[in-house]
Image: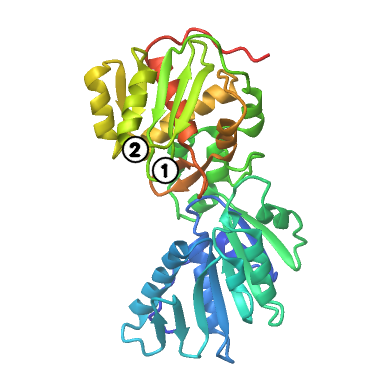
Amino acid sequence: MPAALRLPPLYGKQHDAIHDPARIVVIEAATKVGKTAGCMCWLLGQAWNDPKGGHAYWWVAPVYQQSRIAFDRMKAWMREADPLKTIWKSHDTEQWIELANGNRISFKSGENSDNLYGEDVYAAVLDEATRMREESWHAVRSTLTATKGAVRIIGNVRGRKNWVHALAQRADGQTVAYHKLTAYDAVEGKVLALAEVEAAKRDLPEHVFRELYLAEPADDGGNPFGMQAIEGCIVPLSTDPVAVWGVDLAKSQDWTVVVGLDRDCRVAMIDRWRSDWGQTLSRLKVIIGDTPALIDSTGVGDPIVEELQRSLPCVTAFKFTAQSKQQLMEGLAARVQSKGIGFPDGWLKDEMQAFEFEYSRTGVRYSAPTGLHDDGVCALALAVRHLGTVGTNTLEVRIF
């Protein structure tokens, strides 16, 4: 490589994991421990040191936006070393970097596995693999068959029920090797500050911290409530009066959802619909009446809440931010895990089971998986929050 090419140094455990001599290496890692940068160095080294040239090397992420992050970072490394592009070239639209020896590193999406078949690949990295379909791994594995190419499979831990964890469990240390990198490994390697990790330990629920920072898989795979805990809260609709309402207003193709809780934190009424804002406004006025309600006022919901407050003084606005949603969902999770809430079987339970958390640069992000909805979960969480605020929460729900 050019003498001026400065790549991030690898700390001991990071180097040992990525440069394991096994052909297939699975690395389950905590967040921000250097797995991405380390594997970028590895892939660039594989392509640079291949003397024959004209070979394909792949970086595959769940979607193009994620592969673009790695593409831009590697391009910045190359530009710093050789701003005139005398030893490399790139294509921004097709997302590839070609080296002077003719070897090309392509940055691809695993969203459609059919697009990954056909080429002979000499080394590959599957980034954020726990968020990638297993079919994409099958496709990439097929491209490495003729070349006997090596692959590094990296990602944050997301429970035990995924193909990455299953592959890790089959590791034999020869063909398939397994490594785990924790936040404390990164602290030892001076990549993370100990104070930051300890602050996260204080701030986050234990199950979130253990997955995100200790790389310890939970049985429920990223669900903040727990599958068994959700099942334990299923009860018929309460026949008692509604004490508070939680309302999540529709955004785009979402639903407007209304959840009413009785004073014992059991769902007494639940409804959802799609309609224009005029119809939604009229319907909410009838449903809410003079009962306290906490309503999502984020974005387009703000004028709706203001209009409701003109005639319904019992309405309170709630703005969603990353921090406020985290606090809201942690409150709901505490209720569910202690069986301090009751809700009916059906679509709301399905939303609860599909709900997940993931790490982002601003903290923990709670949401439904792509293509699914979390409107019911948000409305339920708003109702739980308001029940404590208005002081009607005096009894715990009893599950029979």
User: Residue 190 at what x, y percent from top left?
Assistant: 45, 54
Instruction: Return the residue nearer the eye: 336 or 350.
Output: 350
> Type of residue at label 1?
Gly
285 on left or right of 70: left
SS at mark 2 in the image = loop
Task: Point out which mark residue 268 bears.
Answer: none
Residue lying at 55% horizontally and 51% vertically, measured from the top left: 185
User: Residue 344 at what x, y percent from top left?
Assistant: 59, 24
- Is 313 situated above or below 172? above
Instruction: Return the residue nearer the eye: 164 or 400.
Output: 400
Residue lying at 59% horizontally and 36% vertically, measured from the top left: 350
- Is 60 situated above or below 163? below
Q: Residue tagged by mark 1?
A: 363
Task: Point out which mark residue 276 bears.
Answer: 2
Q: How is the image coloured?
A: rainbow
User: Residue 172 at what x, y percent from top left?
Assistant: 78, 61
- Is 314 situated above or below 154? above
Q: Nearer the viewer, mark 2 or mark 1?
A: 2
Residue situated furthest left in the rendering: 310
| Precedes in sequence: disc 2 or disc 1 | 2
Asked if residue 296 can be seen in this view, the reply is no
User: Residue 195 at what x, y percent from top left?
Assistant: 42, 41
Asked if residue 288 can be seen in this view, the reply is yes
Q: State the image quarter where residue 313 is shown.
A: top left
Asked if labels 1 and 2 touch by Cβ distance under 8 angstroms, the answer is no
Instruction: Return the residue nearer the eye: 367 or 295.
Output: 295
Residue lying at 36% horizontally and 24% vertically, measured from the top left: 284
- Is 165 situated above or below 124? above
Q: CA distance from mark 2 to mark 1?
A: 34 Å
